[in-house]
Amino acid sequence: MPTRGEIEVGGATLHDITGSALSRWRGRSIGLVFQFFQLLPTLTVVENVMLPMDFLDQTPRRQRRSTALELLDQVGIVEQADKLPSALSGGQQQRAAIARALANDPPVVLADEPTGNLDTAMSDQVLELFAGLAEAGKAVVMVTHERDVARFTSREVTLSDGRIVGDHARAEAVSA
């Protein structure tokens, strides 16, 4: 919790929301892309993508698989849907993690070092995907130590020792 001030996202003042209401807000509003994917190894890729839908329960059960397959198609790995995560490359696992983050159509996507484990070509593909999401109206917030990622962004905020030391808007980002 903040020690002073307020955190407001999309009209919701977060410190006023607690418990299950906060979990539900998070499930509707935020898609998380973890640095190390965090795919459940015993679930298929499509089941991993369906999992947030199961938790939030806003997508009808009969539509969840088709929605998950559409998301996997959007990230270019629909043919991997029925495989376990261990059968996928790192780039494919990251794309599955992105599809899972989009499962409940959140307006905000938070990505922690999303290209840290990928080669240059796959990193560029993931960053182009994020640029496309931003173009489509999603807020994409990415935390990274990789400076060359900035060419894909419309804004770069630089932190040092927990303080903002730079805030630069860009006229044009690379788009998908």
Image (cartoon, rainbow, N blue to C red):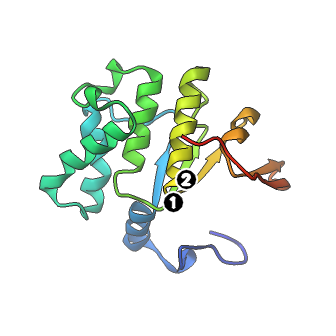
Picture layout, residue 12 above or below residue 157: below
Q: Are marks 1 and 2 in contact (CB under 8 Å)?
A: yes
Q: Is residue 157 left or right of residue 88?
A: right
Quarter containing the N terminus:
bottom right
The amino acid type, in three-letter code, at marker 2 is Ala
Q: Residues within 10 Å of mark 2 (few under 14, many from 20)?
A: many
Which residue is label 2 attached to? Answer: 134
Q: Residue at x 59, y 30 (%)?
A: 124
Name the disc covering residue 137, or none.
1
Give 173 or 34, whichever is nearer the viewer.
173
* Res 35 visible: no
Picture layout, residue 16 above or below residue 53: below
* Res 81 visible: yes
Residue 57 in the image, given as x and y percentages of width and height: 24, 62
Give 74 or 83, whichever is nearer the viewer.
74
The kind of secondary structure element at disc 1 is loop
The amino acid type, in three-letter code, at marker 1 is Gly
Q: Residue at x 39, y 61 (%)?
A: 27
Q: Is residue 27 left or right of residue 3?
A: left
> How many numbered marks have been drawn onto this rendered protein structure?
2
Quarter containing the C terminus:
top right
